[in-house]
Image (cartoon, grey):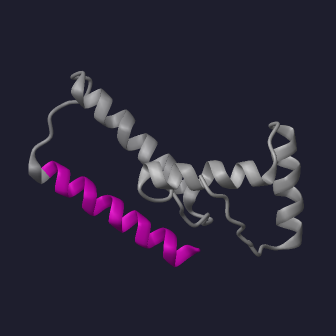
Amino acid sequence: MAQVSMTVRMDAELKQMFDALCREIGMSANTAMNVFARQMVNFGGIPFEIKSKRKDDEVYERGVQAFRNIRTMAESGQLPDLSLDEINEEIRLAREERKRKKVHA
């Protein structure tokens, strides 16, 4: 297969860190870029999630974990059944508490 050359522009400090990491794992930056390109083609897009690192990511992750724990407990019968009215009351109380916290913050 014919080889072509490609130029990539990036921040000098990022390039230094990229080169160092590539050396640590035993490949050149050129090989790493080829691996990335191959994975994009095979995957049909970028082969990993791209998201913003926000301050509230930790809060979000704790919320997701809490949801998963509650779901596991519910599936195993460890939680009492709640009526729709009881669920709505829980939501209302949680919203009131959140509003109070915002006012006092």
Name the residue at 42% across, 66% down.
98
Q: Which residue is drawn at 34% across and 65% down?
A: 95
Give the image location of residue 36, x and y in percent.
61, 52
Q: What stretch is highlighted in magenta?
A: 86-105
Q: Is residue 45 above or below residue 35?
A: below
**31, 1: nearer the viewer:** 1
Q: What quarter of the picture does the C terminus occupy?
A: bottom right
Q: Relative to residue 93, is residue 13 drawn left or right?
A: right
Q: Main secondary structure of the magenta part?
A: helix
Residue 100's spot in the image, x, y percent?
Answer: 45, 71
Is there any visible trace of residue 68 in the rendered image?
yes
Q: Is residue 89 magenta?
A: yes
Percent of width and height locating residue 55 = 62, 65
Q: Does the magenta stretch include residue 103?
A: yes
- The location of residue 28, given as percent across then percent down, is 81, 48
Residue at 54%, 55% in the rendered image: 59
The quarter holding residue 92 reads: bottom left
Residue 48 appears in view:
no
* Count of all numbered marks drawn on residues in the image: 0
Residue depicted at 16% across the width and 49% down the height:
86
Please state if 76 lies on the left or on the right of 66 as rendered. left
